[in-house]
Image: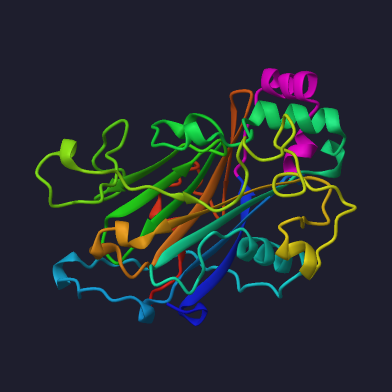
Amino acid sequence: MTIEDYQTRQFRLVLADPQLTIAQLAHLEQHLGINKHNLTQIEVTVVAQYPRASALSFKTLPHSTLINNSRAISYPAADKSTDTEQNHNTFAQTYRRAELTDSTPRLWLSYFIHLPKELADQERLNTFIESSGWLPRCAQEVMFSDYLWEGTCLECFIGGFGTEYVEVNASPTGQYALYHFQDYRQPNDMPPPPLYLSQDKPTTASRQRAYISWQDNNDSNSAFTKYGVSPVSDFCPSTYTINPTAIQSSEFCPAYPTLLQRHLTIDLKQLPKSLLPLTDLHPCVILNLDGIAFYYAPQHAPTPDFHNRHYWHTIGRQ
């Protein structure tokens, strides 16, 4: 596949109304130094790159498996690219260990969390990183793990023309999970059924779970500080600027005082053929601060529900 075979989409995630109690607000202010205004100033963005439908080889689905995925939601037209958006795309391109010209079709996901300048001092930043669990990735922790949504979790929901879909969960510290649903939250098991590489094997014991590949260099073996703060990845002082020499040496970072980021990719050959080409995408983030969950998505149902396909974004429907 070539670069021309891919599309790029930038999603601006919005915070669902957290409806915090007085006790929760007091805890955030007293223990984390974060007030309600700070929460509204946190910016969450996801850059997704995925193959165009014309670039994928897939079997035509039987007509009986197709569903009406018409949307009542009218999506706003994409804004003109800003410097921030261009920088996000640059970072997404740079933090790659595989190339877009690789023959394997992939879904690339880059997550960016911009913290407000009020959290830029080192003490409050360290407190935020510790309370959110955004710690350096440890190689020993890169493994399948359930219930990641109980902490800070990077998520993405992937759908095709049928009712089935895949949920991707990833913890900043390295754990991940891919779940396979046949319809809305079905089967209704807890934890949900994993996505397996071999759908035709008779028993789950003989199957291998699907996996993600981390694309950034944020691991505990790198030259990071206690909190994973370095010019290579998580945190970049505002004195840094982007230039070609810096990018080539992986010593670049954004001109923002506080930026958290993670980059991952999913081999689409792991997905059931019935999910290709991709038609719907819904990147989300759960930011958990000392046990208080905040939900970010491009759009929300009245009661936040990432599984509600009515609010997913259409990316490949002709």
Whether residue 203 is visible here, answered yes or no, is yes
Say whether residue 20 is magenta: yes
Whether residue 305 is visible here, answered yes or no, is no
Which residue is at 37% across, 77% downward?
53
Q: Which of 180 and 294 is in front in this view?
A: 180
Relative placement, left or right, of 130 versus 197 is: right
Which residue is at 70% across, 32% downward?
129
Q: In which quarter of the image is the N terminus?
A: bottom left
Relative placement, left or right, of 148 versus 234 is: left
**Residue projecting furthest to the right:** 239
Q: What stretch is highlighted in magenta?
A: 16-40
Task: Give the vertical position of 48 relative to 136 (above or below).
Answer: below
Task: Give the vertical position of 128 relative to 69 (above or below).
Answer: above
Task: Give the vertical position of 32 relative to 173 (above or below).
Answer: above
Q: Nearer the viewer, residue 242 or 130?
A: 242
> In the image, residue 304 lies at what x, y percent?
50, 42
Relative placement, left or right, of 32 versus 202 is: right
Which residue is at 29% across, 43% downward?
209
> In the image, residue 145 lies at what x, y percent?
40, 33
Q: In which quarter of the image is the C terminus?
A: bottom left
> Which of the 4 image quadrants contains residue 55?
bottom left
> In the image, residue 178 lies at what x, y percent?
36, 45
What colour scheme does the image use?
rainbow
Q: Nearer the viewer, residue 170 or 187?
A: 170
> In the image, residue 177 lies at what x, y percent?
39, 41
**Magenta span: chief secondary structure:** helix
